[in-house]
Image (tube, rainbow, N blue to C red):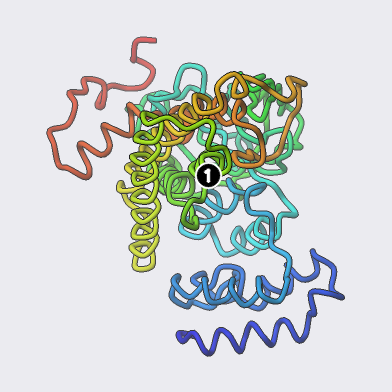
Amino acid sequence: MTEAAELRRHTQDLLAAQPPATTGRLDFLRARFDAGLAWVHYPEGLGGLGAPRSLQAVVDAELEAAGAPDNDPRRIGIGLGMAAPTILQFGTEEQQRRFLRPLWTGEEVWCQLFSEPGAGSDLAALGTRAVRVDGDGWVVDGQKVWTSSAHAARWAILIARTDPDAPKHRGITYFVCDMTDPGVEVRPLRQITGEAEFNEVFLTGVRIPDSHRLGEVGDGWRVAQTTLNNERVAIGGMRLPREGGMIGPVARTWRERPELRTHDLHQRLLELWVEAEVARLTGERLRQQLAVGQPGPEGAGTKLSFARLNQQISGLEVELLGAEGLLYDDWTMRRPELVDFTGREAGYRYLRSKGNSIEGGTSEVLLNIVAERVLGLPAEPRTDKDVAWKDLAR
């Protein structure tokens, strides 16, 4: 199906067969996936129809107008934005059929076991080890950190070192890890907001079958680049309406609370409103580019802009509200399954946005990516690229 009219008819057929008003939410989502209307650009049988990515908006509009349930994408963002495209590109047919359907319907939540205490910005220096045993399995030992939703996840995408004698980028292998297996321990990391959406994960003798390996042994860094490129687009290039995201609440406060206005705040709000709109349109352009290929390093630019704007806008909002902006609703320790930037008060937005320049790749690392891979500037000198990982100073 390559025409919008065909997709509309197909969507109406789904709605007729599974009326949202009388069909259970999960039953409807499963039927939508099986009809190829989950992500239309995926292959048939894997939730798609092999149609252009741009036609997903046609399907979404028809379903929204009919009051159909969605799959709560904010709750399963790591699965949708990072795990799924990696499984599609590198997974076997068996892996694709096992993981993609419950991932998309939200029956199985995913997390990402990449960063480590000693390998955050320099991810390729990771030290979690995977040792092959019994010919068809692996035993994994190590520690991961800053793992969003690990406390709610059934599955994790995991990179581990399988060859310490190879240089750091070459001795890594990519796995799917069952978070319910023995040896997986999840501990909360309480944040400045009082919540613990992040976690640290300890892996002790965790057995992973070789059938849960994605890509070739030792090729995990290349596989991980697919995940990371998609992660930056998922974070920084999400589809928003005008005044969507962080700029919406502060613009609304400005209109509704004229007594708070000053000339200086007005000028700053105008500048940030324009920058937010430019970022929104840039994200739309990036998604159009995705319609004809895989995400590239350009996603690093949108992620950079997302972090900077969120921090500046939330800071302006706190200033606009004055003493009221310093209030905070609840410091209770909670373990949320999603981040709700616009559903909380200004104090939460201000504090939570501090993490935007760290999560999904630090701003410093993303600046290097933009400089080297987008602008073509000379690469930063690196003396460790051809040194065996075991010989690196730590």
Residue extending furthest top?
Answer: 394
Residue 134 location, quadrant: top right
Res 212 visible: yes
Nearest to the observer: residue 181 or residue 68: 68
Rendered view: 218 above or below 388: below
Nearest to the observer: residue 104 or residue 352: 352
Rendered view: 202 above or below 342: above
Q: Residue at x 61, y 70 (%)?
A: 47
Nearest to the observer: residue 160 or residue 280: 280
Rendered view: 68 above or below 200: below
Point out residue 88 in the picture as x, y percentages from the top left corner: 51, 60
Res 161 visible: no
Residue extending furthest front?
Answer: 259
Point out residue 261 in the picture as x, y percentages from the top left corner: 47, 32
Quarter placement of the C terminus: top left
Q: Is 184 situated left or right of 239 in this image? A: right
Q: Is 14 situated left or right of 369 in this image? A: right
- The total of numbered circles placed on residues is 1
Residue 221 location, quadrant: top left
Q: Residue at x 48, y 57 (%)?
A: 239
Q: Residue at x 40, y 25 (%)?
A: 121
Using a 10 Å C-alpha cutoff, classify the residue at mark 1 as few (fewer than 14 neighbours), some (14 to 19) or many (20 or more): few
Rendered view: 83 above or below 102: above
Q: Secondary structure at mark 1?
A: helix
Q: Amino acid at mark 1?
A: Arg
Point out residue 201 in the picture as x, y percentages from the top left corner: 65, 25
Point out residue 308 in the picture as x, y percentages from the top left corner: 39, 33
Q: Which residue is mark 1?
A: 255
Residue 49 location, quadrant: bottom right
Q: Residue at x 56, y 27 (%)?
A: 321
Q: Is 374 situated left or right of 133 in this image? A: left
